[in-house]
Amino acid sequence: MSKVAVLGAGSWGTALSLVLADNGHDVQLWSHRKEQADEINQNHTNEKYLKGSRLPEAIVAFHNLEEAIDQVEHIIMVTPTKAIREVSKQLVPLINDAVTITHASKGIEPGTFKRVSQVIEEEVPEEKRKGIVVLSGPSHAEEVIQRQPTTVTVSSSQLELAQEVQDLFINENFRVYTSPDMIGVELGGSLKNIIALGAGISDGLGYGDNAKAALITRGLAEIARLGGSLGANPLTFAGLTGVGDLIVTCTSSHSRNWRAGNLLGRGNDLDQVLDEMGMVVEGVRTTQAAYQLSQEQEVEMPITQGIYKILFDKADPKDVVDQLMTRGRRHEMEDLSNILDNQYS
Ligand SMILES: NC(=O)C1=CN([C@@H]2O[C@H](COP(=O)(O)OP(=O)(O)OC[C@H]3O[C@@H](n4cnc5c(N)ncnc54)[C@H](OP(=O)(O)O)[C@@H]3O)[C@@H](O)[C@H]2O)C=CC1
Ligand SMILES: O=C(CO)COP(=O)(O)O
């Protein structure tokens, strides 16, 4: 059994701590708020993020980061992506022996366009880490905390590290696969949040299943297009961290991104929505990053562009849908256009 630090005591950090505790590991859960650490230790609850759930006593919460990572073999980072750089910097002077750093956060940094593993790599020097692993897939914390069947994928450039983290988390309720495609796994988990915002907007506008299926499928096409241009294996997007995560976030009211989109589709403005959510809505920041990235890479991403206009230019969601529906005609598999043109001639 291992001693594991989980950094970030929100919904996902707490749910992953439960999986680790169920597997017999010693879990040291770090919260940057003292009152939250106290609540977890005294009441074994985390009411703000997982209302009504009782946590195993093997989860011990810490407010002090140095104590939280003392003697651990694994660090699991699960803060919102905007805090990853800052927390990585805080960690550096506190790490004595090299550790395996896994992250389970989903986002891309605007401006730098870095994936979370790249941010960690930049901030934590090589001698302080054995390697970096990502854990991603269709997995709402609200179901994991109830030990409902869930599947995820772990990926690392070092297979043995991915397998080590697979062993750490896998159990009869939580099945863990490995993948060698870290770029694809991280991009799939991050970019699906943009489409989940779109699915929520569509539902908020009163559109039905046809529109949602279109968003998921065409969203997947543009995610794979950008991913391919950044070095991901396009097949990864057909897996758990691509289409799997798109399905779970676009069709569930557990999803923070879907919920935020739904409120936007009902006419609320972004600041109001984010205030009301009180939890991280990663898709907002990732939309900004993906929009900039698509322009830099010259990759067509019409849905992302539409969501960007709604979020940051206050475009009317109905007008954006009209624009998407009246774009120029094209083949469905546009990257195969040349082949199809030949077939038709
Ligand atoms: N929820 C889920 O089902 C899943 C979430 N994820 C990903 O996990 C990541 C975390 O999401 P989630 O747990 O849902 O988020 P939540 O909003 O539920 O919780 C975020 C947690 O991070 C803390 N936090 C915020 N800023 C900092 C900081 N600067 N330093 C330390 N801690 C900080 C918050 O503290 P405070 O209470 O003070 O704000 C809170 O405890 C995201 O990237 C998300 O995409 C991935 C899979 C599933
Ligand atoms: O990534 C998730 C499930 O796999 C959680 O999505 P939300 O952040 O939209 O809740």
Image: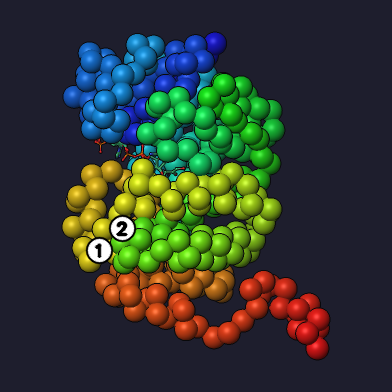
Q: From the top left corner, tell me how far across and down residue 280 is, in percent.
A: 31, 46
Q: Residues within 10 Å of mark 2 (few under 14, many from 20)?
A: many
Q: From the top left corner, tell me how far across and down residue 31 is, in percent.
A: 29, 28
Question: Which element is circle 2 on?
Answer: helix
Q: Is residue 3 visible?
A: no
Q: Is mark 2 within 8 Å of ligand 2?
A: no
Question: Which quadrant does the N terminus fall into?
Answer: top right
x 72%, y 73%: residue: 336
Question: Which quadrant does the C terminus fall into?
Answer: bottom right
Q: Is residue 155 visible?
A: yes
The residue where tag 1 is placed is 266
Residue contact between numbered discs 1 and 2, judged by CB atoms under 8 Å: yes
x 51%, y 66%: residue: 214
Q: Nearer the viewer, residue 321 or 281?
A: 321
Quadrant for residue 59, please give it: top left
Residue type at numbered disc 1: Arg
Quadrant for residue 175, please give it: top right
Colour scheme of the rendered structure: rainbow
Q: Quadrant of ligand 1?
A: top left
Label 1, label 2: how far apart the Cα atoms are:
6 Å
Quadrant for residue 30, please give it: top left
x 50%, y 50%: residue: 247
Q: From the top left corner, tell me how far across and down residue 23 is, in percent.
A: 51, 15
Q: From the top left corner, tell me how far across and down residue 343 is, in percent.
A: 81, 81
The residue where tag 2 is placed is 262
When the figure is inspected, residue 242 is found, relative to residue 129, above or below; the finding is below
x 57%, y 21%: residue: 172
Q: Which mark is residue 197?
A: none
Q: Residues within 10 Å of mark 1 (few under 14, many from 20)?
A: some
Question: Which element is circle 1 on?
Answer: loop
